[in-house]
Amino acid sequence: MISTNQLKNGNHIEVDGVVFKVLETQHVKPGKGAAFVRSKLRRASDGNVIEKTFRAGEKFRPVHTEARAMQYLYEDGADAHFMDGQSFEQLAIPLDKVQSALRFILANDTVQILFIDDQPADIQLPASVELTIAHTEPGLRGDTASGGGDKPATLETGAEIRVPLFINVGERVKVQTETGAYMSRA
């Protein structure tokens, strides 16, 4: 069992039969009354974020998590298919669980698949990825790096992002995976 004073960001715990990932914890010791822990948790099944307060010393079942490197093969409309590079075993994950992560993954890329209690749950993306711009409108004459403004662009994976006016088709850009925001040229 894991206690509230052992909670750390990134841990997975089971609360009332549901698996959550701990995003934030704050231990509060009021001047009057018992101590408690405020936490922000993300439900592993659907990604919803909730805030929950626990009494100090409350115990939870720790959840076994493991990240395995797997190669992304393709999606067929219902599932995303991955292959283990060691055993060549193939795995299908429902598309609704991993749709947002697939925006930044190309076919044959190696990604980390998070397994919770030996069941595939999510794709762990790096903080940023480098991708090529597949389509964007040309910038107007006089647009410069300091000129401000942005325009829509389509990445080679099909994801839509906003880029500065000076970015052109074929350039590689660095994109933050959590927000989908342009960071810099690669």
Image (cartoon, rainbow, N blue to C red):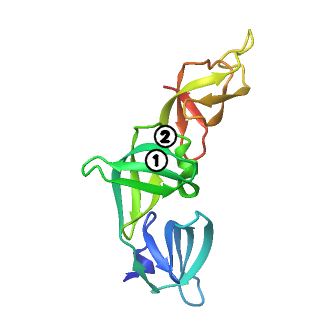
- Image quarter where the N terminus lies is bottom left
Quadrant in which residue 32 is drawn: bottom right
Percent position (x, y) of residue 29?
54, 81
Q: Which mark is residue 125?
A: 1
Q: Is residue 31 above or below residue 168?
A: below
Viewer-proximal residue among 71 and 124 = 71
Percent position (x, y) of residue 92?
44, 55
Percent position (x, y) of residue 173?
53, 27
Disc on the earlier residue, 2 or 1:
2
Helix, strand or loop under label 2? loop
In the picture of the structure, the residue carrying the numbered disc 2 is 105
Percent position (x, y) of residue 178?
56, 47
Q: Which mark is residue 139?
A: none
Residue appearing at x 59%, y 79% in the figure:
53
Contact between marks 2 and 1 (CB within 8 A): the answer is yes
10 Å crowding of disc 2: few (<14), some (14-19), many (20+):
some
17 with respect to 118 (left or right): right
Q: Marks 2 and 1, Cα distance to the nearest angstrom?
A: 9 Å
143 with respect to 12 (left or right): right
Helix, strand or loop under label 1? loop
Residue appearing at x 35%, y 48% in the figure:
83
Residue type (three-letter) at the residue carrying disc 1: Leu
10 Å crowding of disc 1: few (<14), some (14-19), many (20+):
some
Q: Is residue 46 above or below residue 183?
A: below
